[in-house]
Amino acid sequence: MRLIVNADDLGMSREVNDATFALIDQGLITSSTIMANAPAFEDAVHRAQEFPQVSFGVHLNLTQFAPLSDPDRLRPLLNEDGEFQNPLNLSALNRGLATAILDEWTAQVQRVREAGVNVSHIDSHHHVHMSWALLRVLTELQKRLDIHRVRAPKTVFLQPMTPRLHAIRLRCLAWKRAVRTPYPTHMTDTFAEYETIHKLHVARPLRFEIAEAMVHPNHPMYADETTLLRHNAHEIPDLERVSFWEV
């Protein structure tokens, strides 16, 4: 099986950038997605030029930091400080707000491209691109900017399969089919946290052709994940590590 190890949140802070590029330099991370409206964006795109073998995508954002486009058009999504808030509240979504989100995401992708990064794919902060309510916005973004690679939904779990997890898996597979319908879109066969992919594959080799494992370097909630990545990669030597350009 081929495995993409993608680091989310590149550009969130200098500390996140340092941790991510250190793991890239060790060959443990093969891909990363950049937050175009984050504080350490300039540092991230500058250092990305040093790693042409790594795929760099855009981490579409609607839940943190200030928007790049007109904040007045995005007002329902912003807090009193003019920054995106989490969780994302789409109760006010209408045609005007959907268009504003499309323009904001366009600005985020364009900022990464204009910084000299060859954008490989898109995913999103807190997985907001997988919202059914934003499906048309996502596909319009792909058409507008000619983006063919998108992060797949999660379809494998560490927990035993329950009726609830089975229903979630079916919804994720339906979303995956829906995204591929209006525009030619390439996705991995599955996606999950690195810990999930690692533990499942060690227990019984996964039979996918290509999978994506997500990591969050320097995130306190994911310290064990980074330790697992750094010290236990040898436990799954039959995996070929590739970038998103292979999708």
Image: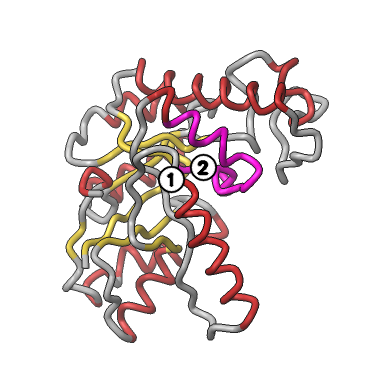
For residue 181, which numbered disc appears in the image?
1
Q: How many marks?
A: 2
Magenta range is 123-142
For residue 124, which numbered disc appears in the image?
2
Task: Choose between 108 and 163: the one closer to the eye.
Answer: 163
x, y percent for residue 14 = 45, 34
Q: Magenta segment: does it hold 133?
A: yes
Answer left or right for 241 relative to 140: left
Q: Is residue 116 above or below residue 53?
A: above
Would you say the magenta stretch is mainly helix, strand or loop?
helix
Q: CA distance from mark 2 to mark 1?
A: 20 Å
* Residue at point 52%, 59% (across, down): 174
Residue type at tag 2? Ser
x, y percent for residue 175 = 52, 54
Q: Earlier in the sequence, mark 2 or mark 1?
A: 2
Task: Choose between 78 and 134: the one closer to the eye.
Answer: 134
* Residue at point 42%, 69% (across, down): 195
Q: Magenta segment: does it hold 215?
A: no
Location of residue 2 (image quadrant) = bottom left
* Residue at point 42%, 28% (across, down): 143
Query: What secondary structure is found at the residue carrying circle 2?
Result: strand
